[in-house]
Amino acid sequence: MNSSLFPAQPREIAPGAVHVPGWLSLDEQRELVTACRDWARGPVPMRSAKLPGGHSMSVQTVCLGWHWQPYKYSRTADDVDGRRVADFPEWMADLGRRALAEAHQDPAAGEGYNPDTALINFYDDQARMGMHQDKDEKAAAPVVSLSIGDTCLFRFGNTETRTKPYTDLDLASGDLFVFGGPSRFAFHGVPKIYPNTAAPETGLQGGRLNITMRVTGMA
Ligand SMILES: O=C(O)CCC(=O)C(=O)O
Ligand SMILES: [Fe+2]
């Protein structure tokens, strides 16, 4: 739990990868939950993306700025309802810049960071995400990840293989995780959600919300 007595302390997991437990206040978490609930309704509804093999992901996703489907970005959600996704809000970009500055304890670390997309993922108790790289972006700018709701087991690996060596850590409600620099293209995944571990004050009834901001490098 974050408080002024125990401010969030960044922990480097790998070069360029930093975990900041309890970074978001409960008020900020609540505001994000409200905003995400709205985006989940439309203009492009939250859905489980279909993989090229035909299976659907267990996670449900809605995007801002650019629509992601396995494995590309577009302005319109051609695999859902064909509509243009909601804009990526400037307040979220501000949050992303503050996240980088505080994770790296360097006021300049967020300068020039202009994320133009966010993937908002919802995990129910059974949902998982296999080991993967975020590599559909044509830019190497950091990914800023925010977690709200139930705690998950997060696996952060290496850039070479989807297997060991990796670090397992818990991402709890309010946690920030950033990965950039030499860790930007590291494999990572979510092997497990711990049901009923969230504080009810976030406004989320159950499950886990994760927001990742990215720079697509697209125009
Ligand atoms: O849910 C998470 O913490 C990670 C999500 C993720 O890796 C992704 O959306 O690419
Ligand atoms: Fe990812």
Image (cartoon, rainbow, N blue to C red):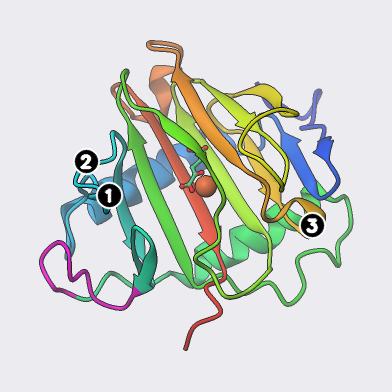
Which residue is denoted by mark 1 in the rendering? 51
Q: Looking at this rendering, what residue extends furthest in the left direction?
A: 81
The numbered mark at residue 101 is 3
Residue closer to the observer: 216 or 53: 53
Which residue is denoted by mark 2 in the rendering? 55
Q: Are marks 3 and 1 in contact (CB under 8 Å)?
A: no
Q: Quadrant of residue 155?
A: top right
Residue at 71% across, 48% down: 159
Q: Secondary structure at mark 3?
A: helix
11 relative position to 177: left or right? right
For marks 3 and 1, the one nearer the N-term is: 1
Q: Is residue 65 magenta?
A: no
Q: Secondary structure at mark 2?
A: loop
Percent across and percent down for residue 103 are 78, 47
Does the beta carbon at disc 1 come under 8 Å from ligand 1?
Answer: no
Percent across and percent down for residue 108 are 86, 67
The numbered mark at residue 62 is none
Q: Are marks 3 and 2 in contact (CB under 8 Å)?
A: no
Residue at 68% across, 27% down: 2
Q: Indicate whether 150 appears above or below 41.
A: above
Percent across and percent down for residue 132 are 53, 44
- Span shown in magenta: 74-83
Q: Count the labels in the image.
A: 3
Question: Label 1 is placed on what type of residue?
Answer: Leu
Q: Indicate whether 97 appears above or below 210.
A: below
Image quadrant in which the N terminus is located: top right
Percent across and percent down for residue 42 are 17, 60
